[in-house]
Structure formats: C-alpha cells, structure tokens
Image (cartoon, grey):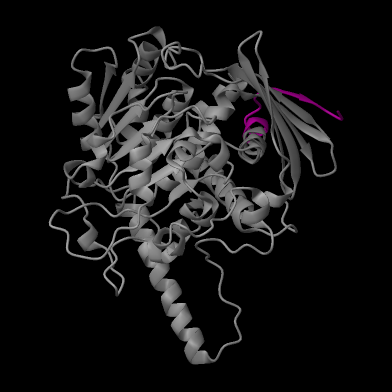
Amino acid sequence: MPLTILSDENVKEVLNSLTKEDVATLQIAMRNSLHEYATGTTNSGACADNQPKRTVIESASTGTTTLFMPSISSSSLGIKVVTLASPSSNSEAADTQKADATPYGAISLMGSNGKPFGFLNAEEITAFRTALASSLLMLRRTKVKTITVFGTGKQAYWHVRLALLLRGSTIKNVHFINRDFNDRAAKIMKSFVTYDIATKRAEGWMDTQFDLASLKYTEIDRILKQRLRASDMIICTTPATEPLFDHTILTNTEGRMRPRLIIAIGSYKPHMIEVPPEVVTQAIKVHGAGHHFHKRAEEGGVIVVDTLECLKEAGELVQAGVRSDRTVEIGELVMLDLMHPHDDDSPIEDSPPSSVNELSISLDGVKSMSKIFGDSSIDNPGSSSRSPSRKSSFTLNRKPSFSLRSSRSASVSSQGGRKKKEQTEREDQMSRWLSNGNVIYKSVGMGLMDLVVGGEVIKLARAKNIGTTVQNF
C-alpha cells in the first residue's frame, strides 16, 4: 500500500485550494462519521463505544500538554499526537490570547488491516477539522450576516474562511476581538482583506467588512456589547481561563432578542472557560408556562456537544454544572440537514429577530425545546441524573435524546401513525430551533475528526499530485 506524506505546506496547499464542492464532500464524510459515533452500535466502526480513550500528559518542566488521540472507523485507524502550551490556571498570569496555542504534531493513518497510507502534519488539519464540524451547524442558520470572533489564530481563520466560502453572499461584517494588536492579529486581517479578488467576487463577499478590536482598548466594554448583540454567530477560539465577556450582554432582555449560534472550541480543561456560565445556564433552563411581555429567541434546553467528554473536560460545562441529560451530541442532529436543506446561496435580509412566539409551542404552554429532550430531571432537581461517563450514556442500548430512526414498535397502525406524526413534529421543531433559535455548540475535538478529514485530505493530495508518496511502503 502506498504511503502519502504531507508537510504543513502540503496540507495548506490542499486546504487553501478547496472548492465549495470539495467542502461539501468533506462535510458529508464528517456528518456520516459523527452520526455513526453518536447513534451507532458496537458493530459500527466509528461508534463511541469503539473509540479508544485519549491520553493527556502534562509536563511541569516545559509547561506543555501532549495529547495522544487514537481513533477507529469502519475502514481505517489513526492516531494524532500533538503538543501545545498549557494555559495557566491563574488568570492573572495567563495572557491566553497572546500565547501560542497552536497544536504541533502529526497524524498517522492506517487501513483497517493496519497498513499505513498517510502521515500528515497536524497543525493546519486540527484547526480545519474543528471548523468543518462547526460548519454543519452554521449551514443550518437562517441568518448569518454578522460574525464576532474571539481570537486570531488558525481556528479563528478556518471558522471564518469556511463561513465565507459557504455563506459569503450573506455575511456583511466580521469582527475580530483579540488581546493585543499583535503580529498574529495583523496577519489574519491581512489574509482576508487582501484575499484574491476573483475568489471573493465568486464567493459573494467582495463587500464584507472586517475589523479588529483589542481587549485592552479603553472602550472595549461598549464595543463588546455593541458587537455581540448585533452578531448572528459568535465564535470563541481562545484557551481563556476566565469568561471572554460580561454575561449580561446576552442574558438580559435586550440580549436575548436576537437568535445566535455560539461556537466555543477553545477550552479543553475544567479550569478553562470562554462562555460565561450564566449564558450556558440560560441555554439549558426550561422556561415555564405563561405570557412573556418581551420577545426572545428560542432556547433549546440543551447544549450541543461534539462528544459527551465535554462534560468532564470543558470548563463552560463543568463550571455551569451541566448534566448529560442537558446535552445532545452533534451527531444526533446533523442528518436533519438532509431533511431540511437550507438555501444558503440567497442573501438574508436584516429581518426582525425570531421570537419564541414564532416557534411551535407545546400544549401546556411551555415555550422551550425541553419537551423534545425530556425535562423530568429539570422539573425535579433532586432526581438523579445520568453519569457523564460513556458507560452510562451509551451502553445498555442508550437511545439518543433526539432520534431520527423510525420506530420499530409493533403497535397498531393508528398508534404508529400518531407516533410518526409526533416524531415529524419534533423533527420540525428541532429544525426551527437549529435554524432560528439560540444554539450553543461546545467542542473539545475528537481523534475521529482527524481520521476522517485526514483520509479525505490524502485523497485530494494524491489527485492533485501534492506531497510525497512512497510506493509499497
């Protein structure tokens, strides 16, 4: 079997030449693997129960963290080993947005028979595959006109780049927020402002405006309030150890009117946090019945996660006390894209924000998505919750919180018809929430993502004759 080796420059050459069609192919591969991870049985290669645990080694002498991330799918095996600087648990000592949080390492790919077929530099792949997973939710959004991004590293770059590639005609403003006006911040601004004009015109973002603000600016509180409230999508990409903004910006009456997608991918340890716990708590709260005098965007009652490991690793979820029954894995949701496609080629006008009154309401008047996921544990705070461990969450034939699989019940036809109608209604309400509600997506990353994207990048590299291929390795 041939082995293809891709350097960091080779990987960048492949990724920077991606077309919208190439990204669509990558999204399909990512969507299928995440769905299999979240809903598959042990007979499915990518199922969560089949994934080896990752190992974390922290070095006190070098101040670094090394991650060993093995993974398996139906057709291949892989392991990524990366080392990155460890953010200090002392928020005063950590200049987290200035520090280099780039993971350096490599990805080894093998077929299901153990024969190697790919060896890639992991630096660019790690940022790209995280952004690719996020894009599955971004494509669901009805409106993506204004984006605010915390951080100016590779994760920030690829989240914005994919947004422009896929939704460029609708995006009017991109606001970057960084600790300093440093070289990295200047680089990301230059990369978009001076981007190839023909490409910008073809993708529809010739007139998109980009700006950069520093957290050290004297007027930053006013700027954060203004930009976050005007944003349709907020992307957090820093290894911060304290919340990036005041929670009241999004939790008070005015802050809750506009529906937003919040993507948080920077924290990966319990002491690290980007999104304020109050914002997370608001998202999982079950809102009671009764008339609301103020319009507000729909809350889902859950946090979308890439893996339930977020419950142990992500500071936002740990510090907010989020339980497993208040989360839903992205793999349980991504197939809704096929049922309710979004026409992302047409510009979205600045229409009034969606309100809870515009979404379907359960018969008892509870205006939240909690009925889809079940709210017994919320109604009864003293009830026991599921353990965040994979054993309690995925073994014993765990059913997803929201399942797209048809019921196999042998009930009479009338009951079957009613169940099918109820399932369709749940799917429609879920789709509306993902498109027009407040959605928080938390990702800590998985080796499976590297395996899937790495394999697809190897295919593209071979087709374009990029990299070095060793025959009969």
Q: Specify the segment rendered in magenta.
A: 460-473
Where is residue 416 drawn, in percent x and y?
A: 51, 85
Whether residue 46 is visible to the viewer of this picture, yes or no, is no
The stretch drawn in magenta includes residue 463: yes
Residue 314 appears left or right of 259: right
The answer to which of 20 and 133 lies nearer the viewer is 133
Query: Is 277 situated above or below 194?
Result: below
- Examine the rendered structure and indicate whether residue 462 appears above or below residue 13: below
Which quarter of the figure has residue 263?
A: top left
Could you tell me which residue is drawn at 50 percent across and 19 percent down? 89
Residue 353 is inside the magenta segment: no
Q: Position of residue 182 (x, y in %)?
A: 37, 8
Q: Residue furthest left?
A: 293
Q: Residue at the spot x=42%, y=76% of the render? A: 422
| Percent coordinates x, y for residue 111 in the rendering | 79, 41
Q: Give the residue at x 17% y 63%.
A: 291
* Left or right: 88 in relation to 196: right
Residue 312 seen in the current view: yes
Q: Residue 268 in the image: x percent, y percent?
A: 54, 30
* Residue at image point 21% right, 22% down: 221
26 above or below 339?
A: above
